[in-house]
Each structure stands twice: as structure tokens, then as C-alpha cells.
Amino acid sequence: MTFDEFWPRYLRQHSRPATRRVHVLGTCVGVLLLLGAVLNGDWRLAVFALVVGYGAAWLSHAFIERNRPETFSHPLWSLLGDFRMTWLFLTGGLDRELDRHGIR
């Protein structure tokens, strides 16, 4: 499966706005913590970045979306999907992308 084939599936697994918001928050905080780990040389921040990033995503799937995270079946595509969704959310393009794939 290519990422282009995976992407609509990823979006369908994130159909609720609250799920997407929690994912974006977790991804942004995780990236900032990872950046802090690199700048400070503190590996504990890198571990915390993974806990925050994946924890937020998994909790949103369990309690908001009520589905199984794609991380377990497609870990690399799922990570790339998180970054793409976050970028689209932050730049205002996510609604258009959801509409393009018939997700709302």
C-alpha cells in the first residue's frame, strides 16, 4: 500500500473533529519536546515526546473516535499521516482535504 492509498483511510479513522484536534495537539507538543531533547541533549525529553505524541493519539482513538489506531497496522504511514494532518490543520487546508475525500 502506498501512502497515497493509505491517506483517505487515515482520514476516515479521524472523522471526528475532537480526534483531529487531540492528534494535532499531541503532535505539536511531541515535536516541541523532541526539539528540546535535541537542543538540550536530554534523552528523557525524547522519551516524553513519544509518550505525549502517541498517548494523545491513542487516547483520542479509544475515547473519542472509538476505533483502533492505524499505528498498529501501518506505523510509518500513520506517523506520516499525523504530520500531514497536523500541517494541513495548521495551514488551513484540512477542511478542503476532508471534503475532497468525502469525510465530514
Image (spheres, helix red, strand yellow):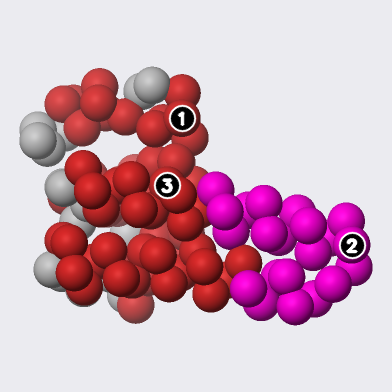
Q: Residues within 10 Å of mark 1 (few under 14, many from 20)?
A: few
Asked if residue 25 lies left or right of residue 1, the reply is right
How packed mark 2 is, by other alpha carbons closer than 10 Å (few <14, some 14-19, many 20 or more), is few
Q: CA distance from mark 3 to mark 1?
A: 8 Å
Quadrant where the N terminus is found in the figure:
bottom left
Looking at the rendering, which quadrant does residue 33 occupy?
Answer: bottom right
Kind of residue sitting beneath label 1: Leu
Task: Tell me, for residue 37, which label it has, or none.
Answer: none
Where does the image place residue 19, in percent across and percent down from the top left? 25, 53
72 or 45: nearer the viewer: 45
Q: Which residues are magenta?
A: 28-48
Residue picked out by circle 1: 90
On screen, residue 31 versus residue 15, left or right, reads right
| Residue name at image x 63 percent, y 53 percent | 31
* Above or below: residue 64 compared with residue 32: below
Instruction: Please state which of the two labelled residues, at mark 2 or mark 1, is closer to the viewer.
Output: 2
Mark found first going from the N terminus, 2 or 1 = 2
Q: Earlier in the sequence, mark 3 or mark 1?
A: 3
Q: CA distance from mark 2 to mark 1?
A: 26 Å
Please state the horizontal and vertical placement of residue 3, each as a whole percent of the image.
38, 50
The answer to whether residue 37 shows anywhere in this view is: yes
Identify the amino acid type marked 3.
Val
**Where residue 2 sits in the image (x, y, percent)?**
37, 53
**Number of numbered discs:** 3
Q: Main secondary structure of the magenta part?
A: helix
Q: Which mark is residue 40?
A: 2
Read off the residue under disc 3: 24
The answer to whether marks 2 and 3 mark residues whose Cβ atoms lie closer than 8 Å is: no
Q: Is residue 33 magenta?
A: yes
Amino acid type assigned to the residue bearing label 2 in the image:
Asn
